[in-house]
Amino acid sequence: MKPALPLDKLTLDKFDLDLLERLQKNCQTPLRELAEAVHLSTATVQRRIQRLKETGYIQANVAVLDPDRLGQVITLLVEVHVEKTHTTELEQLKSSFSGPEIQQCYYVTGDADFMLVILVPNMTAFQEICDRLFHNNPNVKWFRTIVVLDRVKATLDVV
Amino acid sequence: MKPALPLDKLTLDKFDLDLLERLQKNCQTPLRELAEAVHLSTATVQRRIQRLKETGYIQANVAVLDPDRLGQVITLLVEVHVEKTHTTELEQLKSSFSGPEIQQCYYVTGDADFMLVILVPNMTAFQEICDRLFHNNPNVKWFRTIVVLDRVKATLDVV
DNA sequence: GATGAAACGCAACCGAC
DNA sequence: GTCGGTTGCGTTTCATC
């Protein structure tokens, strides 16, 4: 199998970037509509998108759900401070921070070591998570919880 | 027009939840595949999904792009402390935190007022953002930047 | 090697039952 | 919820540049 179109990171032309931007807003836009927007044929658009998938520029196509409607009404940010930052311990922690309630997990510099974004239906659920992930983990020195009052913006947009 | 299917927030049955979970992973799954997975007919699955869109459970269908491949290699968390927290000033700030580089913006309790997740290609770009959003804004008392070393997990998953 | 026009086959969609 | 018909879509082919 031959890579016919640009594989490299920096060889995306304006058409590709235009398409990515549009798909990022709505990945169900019909090819026909995309085609006339970027002034290419549907066939070309289809091939470019396929290539963008194959080469990993497009990682996934997902439905964005409304957390409020699904009862996940509380968003919390948790700053985690760890005891040992050796590779093995870190990897262990990272993999423990992969549950469905944990929307995001960042390993960071500064006085904190991890920053988590957590979504829960109520505080009982959060307490359960704390027990499981923090209190019962000897490598977690301490953690600080920040309550989100307003989810002003929450996307994964890149451009 | 009859609401044949549940409209209320809490009346999603297991089929709806199952569908949402699957669409959240891949919103391009063929109806046929979804149908046999949840043991319903394709027609029903299609109607349910349409309803979930109309009622706002599904907010959007988006392509998830790889930030690294697109040159947005630096992720930063910014803790913003404001001067005045009156409604008008807050709304002004919130709307200023809506640029494309700002992936997420949370209005929070605690000693900070806002927490931002920012994606940039380099530090010059970040500096430009700081100037524009923070230094030139009299209502921003001070801000603290946290550098993300590893984007361990970054989704918008709800369940 | 990438492109666009047109043909193909399949899936989504909409009604009737 | 099932069944068919219709439409519209993504996909492939092929000739062109």
Image: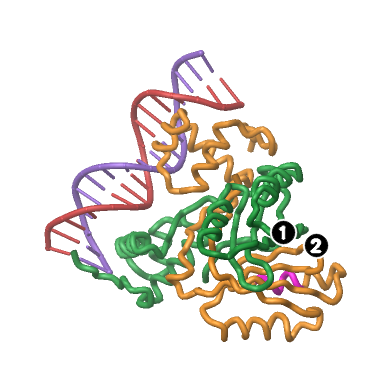
Chain colours: A orange, B green, C red, D purple
Residue at horizontal 57 percent and vertical 56 percent from the top? B93
Q: Main secondary structure of the magenta part?
A: helix
Residue at horizontal 39 percent and vertical 70 percent from the top? B16
| Residue A97 at x, y percent in the picture | 69, 72
Separation (CA) of disc 1 from disc 2: 16 Å
| Vertical placement of residue D15 versus B149, above or below | above
Give the residue type that dot 2 points to.
Answer: Thr
| Residue A113 at x, y percent in the picture | 78, 68
Say the numbered circle drawn on residue B3: none
Viewer-proximal residue among B60 and A143:
A143
- Chain letter for the residue marked with disc 1 in the picture: B
Q: Secondary structure at mark 2?
A: loop
Residue at horizontal 42 percent and vertical 44 percent from the top? A29
| Residue A81 at x, y percent in the picture | 79, 74
* Quadrant placement of the N terminus of chain A: top right
Residue at horizontal 50 percent and vertical 45 percent from the top? A23
Left or right position of B98 against B18: right
| Residue behind mark 1 | B143
| Residue behind mark 2 | A109
Q: Are marks 1 and 2 on the same chain?
A: no
Q: Which residues are magenta?
A: A93-98
- Can residue A126 be seen here? The reply is yes
* Quadrant placement of the C terminus of chain A: top right
**Is there CB contact under 8 Å for labels 1 and 2?**
no
- Can residue B68 be seen here? The reply is no
Give the residue type that dot 1 points to.
Answer: Phe
The image quadrant that residue B123 belongs to is top right
Find out whether residue A95 is within the magenta segment: yes
